[in-house]
Image (tube, rainbow, N blue to C red):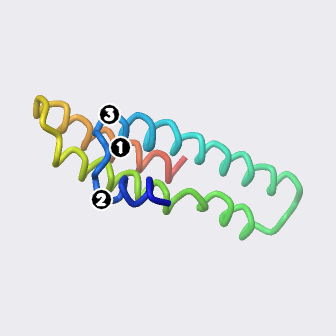
Amino acid sequence: MAVLMSLWRGELPLRHAFWEYAVAYGTIASIFATVAAIASVAMSLPDAVAVGLFLIPVPYILIAVVGVMRSANRYDGPPIWASLARVAVLVWGVLMILI
């Protein structure tokens, strides 16, 4: 929980916030949720179950997006990397929620 709070506050280094917590963990969570949702449809469960399973990672994705944005604000390196991280994490977040 402490790491999630650090991520939310933007206290993690940008490279870790972006690559590890957003891209890696967030993508894995979205893949598992999507597989679970598809499996629930295949098992003829109610559509609400599939939607609920699909949306489980959304709070984490939002935490990761906010965390990367805040980490980018604190980034001391070349400004282009902070700007690229902001754009990329927004695109990633939208894709993870929609796909």
Please report the residue visible at 45 percent of the width from the left and 36 percent of the height from the top: 20
Of residues 9 and 97, the one nearer the viewer is: 9
Residue extending farthest to the front is: 2
Mark 1–mark 2 contact, CB under 8 Å?
A: no
Tell me the element at label 2.
Answer: helix
Tell me the kind of residue under disc 2: Arg
In percent of width and height, residue 6 lies at 36, 55
Tell me the element at label 1.
Answer: helix
Task: State the separation of the CA atoms marked 1 and 2.
Answer: 20 Å
Tell me the element at label 3.
Answer: helix
Residue 36 lies, with reference to residue 16, above or below; the image says below
Nearer the N terminus, badge 1 or badge 3?
A: 3
Tell me the kind of residue under disc 3: Arg
Label placed on residue 66: none
Label placed on residue 91: 1
Residue 53 lies, with reference to residue 42, above or below; the image says below
Label placed on residue 15: 3
Label placed on residue 9: 2
Of residues 15 and 45, the one nearer the viewer is: 15
Nearer the N terminus, badge 1 or badge 2?
A: 2
Question: Pointer 2: residues within 10 angstroms few (<14), some, or many (20+)?
Answer: some
Tell me the kind of residue under disc 1: Val
Please report the residue visible at 12 percent of the width from the left and 37 percent of the height from the top: 76
In percent of width and height, residue 4 lies at 44, 56
Task: State the separation of the CA atoms marked 3 and 2.
Answer: 15 Å
**Left/right of residue 56 with respect to residue 85 in the rendered view:** right
Of residues 3 and 89, the one nearer the viewer is: 3
In percent of width and height, residue 23 lies at 45, 38
